[in-house]
Amino acid sequence: MPLFFRAALGLVFISLFSFSCQATRQVTDQLGRQVTIPDNVDRVVVLQHQTLNLLVQLDATDKMVGILGNWKQQLGDDYARLVPALNKLPTLGDLTHVDLEKLVALRPQVVFVTNYAPQEMIDQIQQLGIATIAISLRAGDATQQSKLNPVLADDEQAYNEGLQEGIRLIGQIVNKPEQAEALIAATFSSRQLTHDRLKSVPEAERLRVYMANPELTTYGSGKYTGLMMIHAGARNVAAPTIKGYKQVSMEQIIAWNPQVIFIQHRYPRVLDEIKQQPAWQAVDAVKNHRVWLMPEYAKAWGYPMPEAMALGELWMAKKLYPATFSDIDMQQRTNTWYQRFYRASYTGSND
């Protein structure tokens, strides 16, 4: 028998023996699976960047013993500044694969994976006797739970309920329920402020917006990023024809002719491309210098994050309708959030 498998079997036996001696409880993950976990969880491996970010905001960084290898790419180069401890953690996989040998050696009690992780990957982890929790940050139709680009009957409800459910689940697993409730409350109270202010902006006057990603990819309906624009009072030009995350043509973008273009913080080179490439100069947003790189906290991934909902949507709305939000000090609000949930000062730009 190969050395790894002998070692793995030995560690699995030790892990299962230890697990059987502990008090346990059952939780339901966001694929609807019943999973048995220890009462006290203090060793987790995180193979999804959204869950990693939520664990940090729940002040559970010290429970991580391993993380996905491309976390800097997924969360942005500046994220390490907020959580220097992540630089010292072992890396052992990504959203769709895991190094089982490294995983066994870390002796985690729980592994967090994304909802669209391959079933084979989930099965392999569970066969090692390690509880595996899938996080989608979406609620609703069970047939869509494992999909990267779901077809949702009600995007708004799916993401609102799914984020709250996901935060509560993660908080429950790592024994941080109070922190989870505080994060949820802060997120949705800030979003309500944005919603209330935008009531004064008539639907007919709301701006046409395009989210520019590398290689002419963008977000349409069915992804949180599209909802983010709606919550900020924007009309996503891609939403009527694009489902999920897809590549479009330059001709299509010119036909849409957005009045504003937003670019995620993690893609600054897209801003340079838009400014430099002649084809983009035909678009109103470029002509009128309304192409904006989003700040670090506006994490407009396909999935919602608390700071994107609480701060990013507000920042976006203020950029679109400055007079309506003239009294909002984004620097002050951002600093307050970062001190409370990241235990660090925010040093990025709000421009």
Image (cartoon, rainbow, N blue to C red):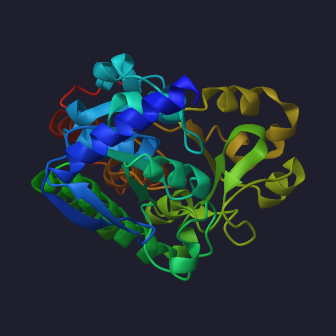
Whole-percent x, y for residue 154 in the image: 51, 80
Relative height, residue 307 to residue 231 (above, below): above
Residue 244: quadrant of the picture: bottom right
> Residue 248: in sight, yes or no?
yes
Quadrant position of the N terminus in the picture: top right
Percent from the top left, x then y, of residue 222?
A: 59, 68
Please state the horizontal and vertical placement of residue 186, each as a whole percent of the image.
Answer: 20, 55
Q: Quadrant of residue 87?
A: top left
* Observer able to see residue 103: no
Say which residue appears at 86% left-offset and 48% top-offset.
Answer: 250
Q: Nearer the viewer, residue 205 or 280?
A: 280
Q: Left or right of 332: which side holds 265?
A: right
Using the image as rendered, state which of residue 27 and residue 337 is in the foreground. Answer: 27
Quarter holding the C terminus?
top left
Q: Residue at x 31, y 48 (%)?
A: 326
Q: Residue at x 57, y 73 (%)?
A: 144
